[in-house]
Amino acid sequence: MISGKIFTRDKIQNRPYYVIRFDERHEEDGSWLPETTKWVAHNVSQEFLDCNTEMLIKSVKQIENLLVEYEALEIDFVIKDDGELEIGKIRELEDVVGMARPMSDKEFKDTKAYAKCNYLDFHHVLSDSSYCDTLRMLGANPRPLEYSIYKELIDTGAWSESIKRLGYEGTTEEIIVKVGNKPYASVNNIVRALMPKDLDELLRYKLENYYEKEIGKLKKSEKYFEQEIILSSYGFDTEEKLNKLIENDFTIDEIEQLRKGLYRQVEEIINEYENISRDIDEDMETLSGVRKKITEKKPCEEKNSMKLFKYIEELIDAVKKYGMTNLVLTDRCVVIAQGFYKVLAGGGSSQRELLYNVSRKIWENEKKTDEFKGIIDIRGRVQNNAHQKYVSKLKEEKPLSIAPDVLMKYIEEAHIGLDPDRLSEFISGSMADTEKCIEEYTKCMGLISDIVIRLGEILGIEYEDMSYLEIQDLLGYHSRDSYIQIINSRRRMYHAYTYIVLPNIICNVGDIDIIDNI
C-alpha cells in the first residue's frame, strides 16, 4: 500500500513539478519504508512513468481541470495493494498563492529541453557520485569557470594516464559532462577504463551490461555506485561481490579470470606504492615551485593583463601535469584501500577501537571536499586563508595506524598473499599522499582564482561576473567587450538552469523529468 500527498506545483519556487511525498508498506511483512519524495515534471512523457505514478497523475490532472480557479492543489491519496487509487482531501496549496514564478512554464519547459539535449549529446549512464571524489569538489551548480577548469584538468588525459599507471585499461573518451549546471561522470567510460588490462572482450562486454543494469537500481539511493557494484579493485569484500556474478549468468571461468586480474593488479600497486609515493613527493615539490615562483611576481598587484593571462596558462599546465594526475592517482589508491579498511573498521568492537584512526580519517575526508569547495570558487574572496586552515587541520591529526595482528587475521581468512606491513603502509600512505595533493592543489586553485579576480579588476569586470567565463575564454585573450557579451549570455543560461531539479543518476532522458529522493 502507498499513502501520501501530491502537490501540483513545487512549494519552494512554484515550478511546474508534481511533488509526491509518500510512504510505502511491504505487502509481505507489513513494514513501512521511509518516506519518499518524487518530483515529476508537468510535461513528462507517459512512457517513463510507472503504473502507479501514471494512474495518480492522470487522476490529478482531471481534478485540476475541474478546479481551474485554484493556482495549485494539495491532494491526499492512497494506492491499495490491489492497485485501486483512492483520492482523499483536496485543498488549495496555500504556499504558492501569490508566489512569483522564476519563469513562465513555457520557458521552464524550453530550459529543461536544453538540459535534455546536453544529455542526449552524450547519452551515457551518468552519475554525480562516481568513484572520483574529486568531482564532488565542484558541487551541484558550479559556475562555468569552475567547471571548465576542472574539465580541462581531467579530460585532457590526466585521469586516464593516472589510472593506466596503476594497471587499468584507461580511456581516450570524455569522463566529465554537464547537464544543465550539474557535473556528472560517465559511468560507461569509467567502468570500461577501470577494468584490469588483461580481461578478454566478452567478459568486458558482459561486465559493462551488468554494471549498467545494477546501477539503474541505485537511482533512488545516495550510495556511490562503485562501493556497491563495481569490481575495479581487490579487497576483503571482493569475494562477496564476485559471488553475485554467478546469479547474473557469469561462468566460473569468467569469475576466476576477473578475480585473478583484480588481485594481481592490487598486489602490484601495493608492492610498488613506495616508488609511487616518492614520485608524488617530487611532483608536489615541482608544482609548489611553479606556484611560489608566480606568487613571488606579485600577480595580485600586476597591471599588465597579458602577464596575468600567461600566469594562468602556466598554472593550468603545471596543475594538469603535476597536480591533477597525482590527485586522481591517490584518489584511486584511497578507493582501493577502502576495499580493505572499510571491512576492518566494520569488525567487532575491539577492531573498531584499534582502527579508530582509520574510520576517523574516512569521516574527515568526506568533510574536506565540501568544506574546501570554495577554493576554486571565484565568487568569494575566501581562497587566501582557506588552504591555511586546511593545512592546520592536517597537522593536528594523529598518524594513521592499523594493528598488524588485525590485518594478518583478515589476510589469512581471505586466503591472499599480501604482506601485512606493506598493506598497512599502503592504506595509511595513500591517505597521507591524497592530503598532500589536495593541499597543493587547493593552493594553486586559490592562486588562479586570485589572478582571475585581478584580471577582472584591470578589465573593469566584477569578480563575480568573471566566474561566468570559461578557462578557454581566458586562454584565448579576448577583448573586454567580447568577455561582457559572453558573460551576459552565460549568466542568463546559468540562472535558468538553476531552477531545474536533476537526479543523482541519469540512465535515460526520462530521468530528467522524474527524480526520486533528492
Image (cartoon, rainbow, N blue to C red):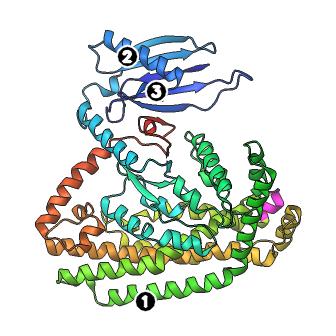
Of labels 2 and 1, earlier in sequence is 2
What is the quadrant of residue 151 in the picture? bottom left
* Relative height, residue 47 to residue 397 (above, below): above
Query: Which numbered dot is residue 61?
Result: 2
Q: Which tag is nearer the camera, tag 2 or tag 3? A: 3
Quick one: SS at disc 1?
helix
Image x and y of residue 51, in percent: 53, 21
Image x and y of residue 336, in percent: 67, 66
Which is nearer the eye, 327 or 75? Answer: 327
Residue at image point 49% right, 88% down: 285
Of labels 2 and 3, earlier in sequence is 3
Which is nearer the eye, 362 or 270? Answer: 270
Q: Which tag is nearer the camera, tag 2 or tag 1? A: 2
**Residue bearing the label numbered 3:** 47
**Mark 3 packing: few (<14 Cα in 10 Å), some, or many (20+)?**
few
**Residue bearing the label numbered 1:** 289
What is the quadrant of residue 79 in the picture? top right
Q: Horizontal placement of 487 versus 517: left or right?
A: left
Residue at image point 68% right, 62% down: 199
Q: Main secondary structure of the magenta part?
A: helix
* Relative height, residue 122 to residue 23 (above, below): below
* Relative height, residue 262 to residue 321 (above, below): above
Residue at image point 69% right, 81% down: 272
Residues in magenta? 345-353
Quick one: SS at disc 3?
helix
**Residue flagged by tag 2: what amino acid is it?**
Lys
- Separation (CA) of disc 1 from disc 3: 57 Å
Marks 2 and 1 close (CB-CB < 8 Å): no
**Residue flagged by tag 3: what amino acid is it?**
Glu
**Residue flagged by tag 1: what amino acid is it?**
Gly
